[in-house]
Amino acid sequence: MNSVTETAHLSIVLTDDERQPCEVWTRVMGYHRPVASFNIGKKGEHCERRFFREARARLDDRD
């Protein structure tokens, strides 16, 4: 085995102190902004968004 394959099989466990928050960005009016900079109303709207799935839309169009 080479070192890349050996490394891929190792399991890395982090404590909560070693973790860092994931920054989520979204497209708003043609440009990207971090969700963390949204006001409380915009954050609520972002949580209520529904995501488009092309395969599902195609099936719905056939009915």
Image (spheres, rainbow, N blue to C red):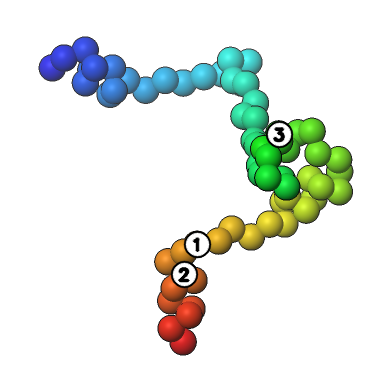
Q: Which residue is mark 1?
A: 53
User: Circle 2 sits in a helix, a strand or a loop, which is it?
Assistant: helix
Amino acid carrying label 3: it is Pro
Of 17 and 46, the residue lying toward us? 46
**Alpha carbons under labels 1 and 2: distance apart:** 6 Å
Q: Quadrant of residue 51?
A: bottom right
Q: Is residue 2 above or below residue 35?
A: above
- Taking the image as shown, residue 52 lies to the left or right of residue 30, namely left
Residue occupied by mark 3: 34
Q: Residue at horizontal 48%, vertical 80%? A: 61
Up-down relation of residue 27 to residue 21 (above or below): below
Q: Could you say which disc has been placed on residue 56 in the image? A: 2
**Place of residue 18 in the rendered image (x, y in percent of width and height, measured from the top left):** 58, 15
Q: Which kind of residue does numbered mark 1 sit on?
A: Arg
Quadrant position of residue 59: bottom left
Question: Which residue corresponds to the image point at 86% horizontal and 40% vertical from the top-left?
Answer: 39
Q: Name which residue lies at 50% across and 62% down.
A: 53
Q: Amino acid at mark 2?
A: Arg
As drawn, is 62 to the left or to the right of 48? left
Q: Secondary structure at mark 1?
A: loop
The secondary element bearing badge 3 is classed as: strand
Q: Nearer the viewer, residue 21 or 15?
A: 21
> In percent of the image, x 13 and y 17: which residue is there?
1
How far is mark 3 from mark 1, CA to CA?
23 Å
Q: Which residue ends up furthest to the left in the rendered image? A: 1
Report if the CB atoms under discs 1 and 2 are less than 8 Å apart: yes
Chain-order first, disc 2 or disc 3: 3
Q: Position of residue 30 (x, y in %)?
A: 68, 45
Distance, label 2 to label 3, CA atoms, is: 28 Å
Mark 3 touches mark 1? (CB < 8 Å): no
Where residue 32 appears, as percent x and y from the top left, is 67, 37
